[in-house]
Amino acid sequence: MLDRYIGFLSTFIKPSLSIPTILILSCLIIVSTANVTYSSEPYSVRIESTYDSHLGMHEYVDVTLEGGDLNLQGFDLLMVFDYQALRFQSCLEGQIYDSCSWEYFTYRYEYRGDDDPPSTLSCLRVVGMAETNNDPHHPSCYNLESKPFTLFTIDFLVTDDRTYECVYVPVRFYWTDCGDNRIAFTPDDPYSRIAVGISRYVFDGDYSSEITNLTDTFPTFFGAPDSCIKGTNPPTRFVDFCNGGIDIICPEPEVGDMNLNGVSNEIADAVLYINYFVYGLAVFDHLEEQIAQSDVNRDGIPLTIEDLTYQIRIIVGDALPYYHTTAENATITISDTAIFFETEESLGTAHFVFQGIVNPVLHNDNMNILYAYSSDDNATRVLVYNIGTAFFSSGLLLTFEAGAELLAVSVCTYHGELVELTIESDTPTDLVVDPVLPDRFVLE
């Protein structure tokens, strides 16, 4: 008699037969022949869950044995998956074949797309046996002490269909009849009578998500029904199954397409970005989309000169991976008519905002300057930049009319990295470090 939940089975054999009496109590098998006693936990078979899988690439999914230490004799496992998302390539023998010299391994793939009604599920059956006949060669072992270990590995080719981005594609155990998903084992030595283990619990993704349903009918994802426990030598509920799958990566959104023409990081994108720093948001036709595209260095802060400079580096072809490292340092000296820089860094871009109408003069022949006055806020915006490989460093950068009031300034390196500014002024100033962006000074 068997009760799955309390784990009790008793099989009584006539004393005249040399077949051991088998007892299962509280999920333990106890095999008793004369004075020999052996106990074990149930088997646990798991399909791996992989993460950050890329479209159009191979992904290898391990099917592992995570629990159970009785002698394995073989397995017959049936799994299904969405063939539109995962294209089966092959199945590879696992560690137990290398370590124990098991003799038999085969698999069969079944495409289900021609079913009526059509199905997107494909089936994969994998069968393994420790030995095929009683010849002089025998496997060196029937289980491995170190767990988990792989029974086999499935090679999938992930679809290149972009509608599957950010999608988890399950690979699940599947039952079409009582012969599916069985493990053959021997409770005592490898040559004793073979027992058959079938599903006890079924889990989806992890061992906290049980989906077992023993009253379901075939076909089912929820384990072998109770109707499979029949016959003179019924199978034992002694195997836990855990489903897995492939989690296809969510690609980072495209950025840098400032003019929204479908091509990122063109010169036209940089020109539009440059115009923003001088003429403001009015240069954008689709404000929200273009602001989202502006975070070229992916630091989470849109519309910065670091983004513009990094975009120029991409266009030129000398962009470095953007690591969001600690800010570099520079000192800016502001006089009544000029701005000087002192730094050991190569600077790429500088942005200034002056009160009122100002006509600045650039004192660096390698750089470009663009500026414009806006009557909306009575300010002149100035951008010093270069769409190329030029940079500026220490020395005089700008001169302007006496009495011009600087409202804000920000600077970044040639590679678009932050620069923390130290301000020195020959005249009184109310500029302070921006509390959010340390590479900027703003009017207090």
Image (cartoon, helix red, strand yellow):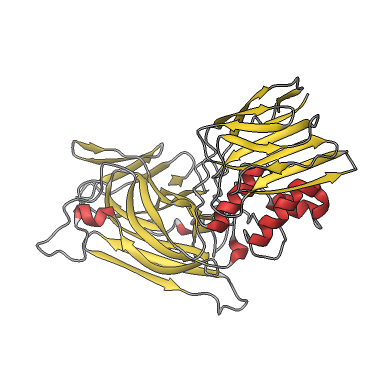
Q: Quadrant of residue 336?
A: top right
Residue 233 visible? The answer is no
Residue beneath the point at 40% across and 63% down: 155
In the displayed structure image, the side of residue 97 where residue 155 appears, left or right: right
- Residue 394 visible somewhere in the drawing: yes
Q: Residue furthest top?
A: 428
- Write down the quadrant of residue 374 in the picture: top right
Q: Considering depth in this image, is 403 or 332 the residue closer to the camera? A: 403
Say which of 368 and 100 sits in front.
368
Where is residue 16? Give x, y as percent.
20, 49
Q: How many marks?
A: 0
Which residue is nearer to you in this view: 228 or 422? Answer: 422
* Residue found 21% across the figure and 62% down from its top: 131
Q: Position of residue 232 (x, y in %)?
A: 37, 58
Relative side of 161 to 261, left or right: left
Residue 113 lies, in percent from the top left, at 55, 76
In the displayed structure, 114 sits above or below 348; it is below
Q: Position of residue 422 (x, y in %)?
A: 62, 25
Q: Is residue 158 above or below residue 303?
A: below
| Front-lying residue, 379 or 132 | 379
Placement of the C terminus among the 4 image quadrants: top right
Residue found 70% across the figure and 32% down from its top: 338
Q: Residue furthest right?
A: 376
